[in-house]
């Protein structure tokens, strides 16, 4: 299965991608996670990326395309992958088509998560992430057993810099202008499936499972 998870910030792409990775045993590739690892490592790429990420802007296409090209050239993706947060612009979608066209099978399906804006803001503003292992929590919807402490590794939970209200609004605007046009792009290719992201993560995963069953006969 070669899948793209599309959707606005906070729709639950990362949450679903991690659940699908465990269930279907195909790896998730999140450009947001890759870039945050580079930021934490203080690499040249990380410093460049952070200057865009902290403002809620997109990292330039050529930078992200190189990151994803390098990642897809690694072994371990023979049975497929779940792209989370890539592509995010038409230029990235076209670059992906080019790269995959050269390398073998293309994208099978694009799962587009749909949620209204107020709920997106609520999910993002309440998100807390473990500084040590990157596990994701939510103050109301997935609260840790001890406040401020990661259930998995005991590390401190922090708010992502781009999850402050002003930056959230900017990210939502960027999504509408830069990324939402991909919905039509993939609809025209006949690959788009829209999925309501309302309800708890298990309910959303159930809808995804139904779509995957219908498409791949799983
Ligand atoms: P990225 O990390 O990809 O951020 P995003 O797309 O804005 O998505 P989020 O991670 O904010 O949300 P999500 O949909 O994954 O939701 P989550 O599952 O965490 O990108 C960050 C930045 O990196 C970008 O702004 C950009 O600068 C740069 N970047 C990355 N990729 C790029 C690219 N291709 N091109 C250019 N720049 C790029 O859930 C959110 C919260 O809600 C969590 O607390 C979770 O616990 C909770 N939750 C999840 N599902 C549910 C549910 N069903 N019910 C209740 N709560 C839920």
Image (cartoon, rainbow, N blue to C red):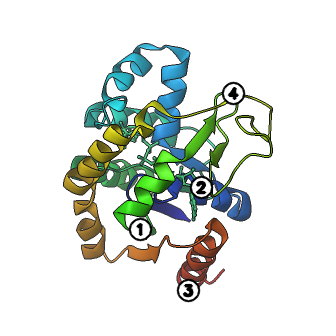
Q: Is residue 42 above or below residue 62?
A: above
State which tag comes first along the sequence, 4 or 1: 1
Where is mark 2, residue-wise? 15
Judging from the image, what secondary structure is the residue with disc 4 in? loop
Q: Are marks 2 and 4 in contact (CB under 8 Å)?
A: no
Judging from the image, what secondary structure is the residue with disc 3 in? helix
Where is mark 1, residue-wise? 115
Q: Of residues 112 and 157, which is closer to you in this image? A: 157
Disc 1 versus disc 3: nearer the observer: 1
Where is mark 4, residue-wise? 132
Q: Residue at x 43, y 21 (%)?
A: 46
Q: Residue at x 66, y 70 (%)?
A: 202
Crowd tier of the residue under label 4, counting other residues whose Cα lies within 10 Å: few below 14, some 14–19, many 20 or above: some
State which tag comes first along the sequence, 3 or 2: 2
Distance Cα–Cα, label 2 vs label 1:
14 Å
Judging from the image, what secondary structure is the residue with disc 2 in? helix
Disc 3 versus disc 2: nearer the observer: 2
Distance Cα–Cα, label 3 vs label 4:
38 Å
Q: Is residue 59 left or right of residue 33?
A: left
Pointer 3 residue Cβ closer than 8 Å to ligand 1: no
State which tag comes first along the sequence, 2 or 4: 2
Q: Is residue 101 above or below residue 153?
A: below
Judging from the image, what secondary structure is the residue with disc 1 in? loop
Q: Are marks 1 and 3 in contact (CB under 8 Å)?
A: no
């Amino acid at each position: 299965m070669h899948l793209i998870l599309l959707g606005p910030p906070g729709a639950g792409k990362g949450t679903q991608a991690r659940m699908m990775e465990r269930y279907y045993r195909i790896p998730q590739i999140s450009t947001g996670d890759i870039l945050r690892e580079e930021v934490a490592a203080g690499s040249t790429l990380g410093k460049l990326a952070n200057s865009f990420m902290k403002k809620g802007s997109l990292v330039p296409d050529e930078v992200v395309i190189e990151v994803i090209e390098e990642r897809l050239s690694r072994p371990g993706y023979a049975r497929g992958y779940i792209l989370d947060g890539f592509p995010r612009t038409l230029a990235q979608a076209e670059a992906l088509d080019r790269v995959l066209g050269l390398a073998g099978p293309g994208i099978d399906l694009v799962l587009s998560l749909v949620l209204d804006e107020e709920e997106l803001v609520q999910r993002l503003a309440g998100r807390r992430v473990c500084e040590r292992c990157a596990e994701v929590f939510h103050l109301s919807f997935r609260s840790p057993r001890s406040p401020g402490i990661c259930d998995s590794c005991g590390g401190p939970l922090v708010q992502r810099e781009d999850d402050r209200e002003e930056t959230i609004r900017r990210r939502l605007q960027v999504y509408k202008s830069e990324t939402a046009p991909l919905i039509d792009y993939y609809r025209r290719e006949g690959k788009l499936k829209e999925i309501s992201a309302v309800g708890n993560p298990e309910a959303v995963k159930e809808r995804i499972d139904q779509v995957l069953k219908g498409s791949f006969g799983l």
